[in-house]
Amino acid sequence: NGAGKYPAFYADNLPGICDIGPGSPTGVCFGYGAKFPAKYQNAFFICDWSYGKLYAVHLTPNGSVMKGTAEEFVAGTPLPLTDIVVSEKDGAMYFTTGGRRTGSGLYRVTYTGSESTAQVTGFDVTERHRTKLPPGVLNQLHRPMQEVGREAGDQIDGLLEYMALEDRFLRFSARVALEHQDPKLWAEKALTERDTTARITALLALTRVSASCPQHDPKRAKAGDPALGAKILDALGKIDFAKLSVEQRLELIRVYHVFFNRFGPPTADQRTAWLAKFEPAFPTGQRFVDGELCQVFVYLQGPKTAAKTVKLLVEAPTQEEQMEYARALRMLKDGWTPELRKAYFEWFVKAQTYKGGNSFAKFVLMMKADAEKTLTPEEKATLQPVLDAKPTAATTAAKPRPFVKKHTMDALLPVIEKGLAAGGRDYDKGRKLFAATNCFGCHRFDNEGGSAGPDLSGLAGRFGVKDLLDSTLNPSKEVSDQYQAVEIDTLDGKKVVGRIVNLNGDGMSVMTNMLDPNGQVRVAQKDIDRVKPSKLSMMPEGLLDTLTDDEAIDLMAYLLSMGKRDHPAFKK
């Protein structure tokens, strides 16, 4: 937990095949044997207790692995799903609800329609990658080659070929295989590899096998050879950071993370060389790249780190991004000014209003406690009013933007279509506008934001420009039953409008303000007269009325990008 969770983009980690977002996972099953259309027979069904959703995850080949796309198959408000099974007797699906002293239920799902429900045989997965190594050899080589009866020779070259592929799952497997071989056979090849992606991956492997992590097992820690460490740093330093893709940048920085953790602090000359190489490039404007670079700058106590990172902290549009900078800065001792210190600790006041799990507030306080340890007695005395301050606001809503004009579908649609077709839009500006219009308060996008509303990362797979703009300008025109609010009339004449987010015992918790998900209203079952669906969306109207035409184009480009900076709308 805390900072111990590896991001999916780390080179020594792998992503999931489908990101569902926040939830409470319970029962799962495949649709095998169900009298459903073929795609649902092959779907992986997963239950989410908290948000009352049963997802059908459709799996398709994606290079060497599968890719999952989640479809909301059944949803209800409330529908606290607990378990699921497909019956062999009647081919129907059954799921149960209940838990936490809520009423239990048993539901049966059958298919009515014209599509065939004949039993299917499963997936057709084809081999897509051919190199010097035969298919299937990679996993066999997760042990020394002589144990599987193979000589090194071309096998090492084959592993390096795999490390140059775009498929990161194959790169990962090839790196693990390489780490199981005697480094004397491949260290020099790793240091001189010409392909940039393969070089980064191979140098990560060389770093990992040449020194061990001192935190994992201090008694058996293996110190790195300084001479080899100098060669690795030199090889890394020859990589042109400016020419790397975002993914390559993240993987390169991760190698530096692992290197300094295992080989220890650099020499004075090595530190100077690293700062000289990366300080001019920081910040890059790339959210995760800047977060990872920041950690190395703090580790090396870079003299410009405080000024650059506090600026990023103040301007970051989401609490997730702010957390990255605040967490890193807590260990920085050098380069502070009184103004920077004040701005940094003022963030902790604001962070007390941010939303998260039960441990969130404690983590923030732990970060603050670490940061206070870097203060001198004089600094602490000066900052005491800020250190003791309490937040005045109870919501993380963005500051209101001034009204620009009332946008209409007829007037705005052709402007946006023309602007998107022309390209040259600004990804980061779109992201900031997504925050400024409070969208991050309710929705997740590219693994950032709230969870009160649907995850919008995959919008482009379901909506075109016209439909997306229409649903934004007219949110109540068509309200999804998965996120529909309810109107609760109580016996004493009160009305509560919102989303039921939790059932517990003899009552329910209702979220009445999407921008303040923790400020919930508790309604006892015995006090309820009637519950009915609301015809109005909890998404407010007029969100785009604070944007100029040009800003609206950038926001739409961001929404349609699926979080990819190389989307055609951003090409110059």
Image (spheres, helix red, strand yellow):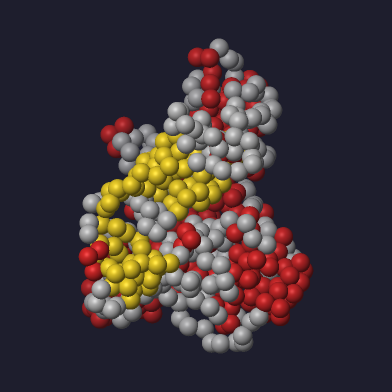
Question: Which image quadrant for residue 502?
Answer: bottom left
Q: Is residue 126 visible?
A: yes
Residue 162: where, in percent of width, then height? 63, 33
Question: Could you tell me residue 97's position as x and y percent?
Answer: 34, 47
**Looking at this rendering, what residue extends furthest in the top direction?**
149
Q: Is residue 352 above or below residue 253?
A: below
Taking the image as shown, residue 415 lies to the left or right of residue 453, namely: right
199 or 357, which is in the foreground? 357
Q: Is residue 378 visible?
A: no
Number of labels in the image equals: 0
Residue in the picture at 46% in, 81% down = 399
- Whether residue 89 sits left or right of residue 341 in the image: it is right
For image coordinates 61% across by 85% down, the residue present is 406
Question: Relative to the observer, which residue lies in front, 272 or 463?
Answer: 463
In x, y percent, where is residue 508? 29, 62
Nearer to the camera, 109 or 123: 109
- The quarter holding residue 268 reads bottom left
Q: Where does the C terminus fall, quadrant-wise?
A: bottom right
Q: Residue at x 53, y 87 (%)?
A: 402
Relative to 279, 94 lies left or right: left
Residue 211 point in image, percent of width and height = 42, 36
In this rendering, the answer to whether 360 lies above or below 196 is below
* Camera-nearest residue between 486 and 442: 486
Residue at the (62%, 48%) spot, across then down = 238
Answer left or right for 417 relative to 72.
right
Residue 527 falls in which quadrant of the image?
bottom left
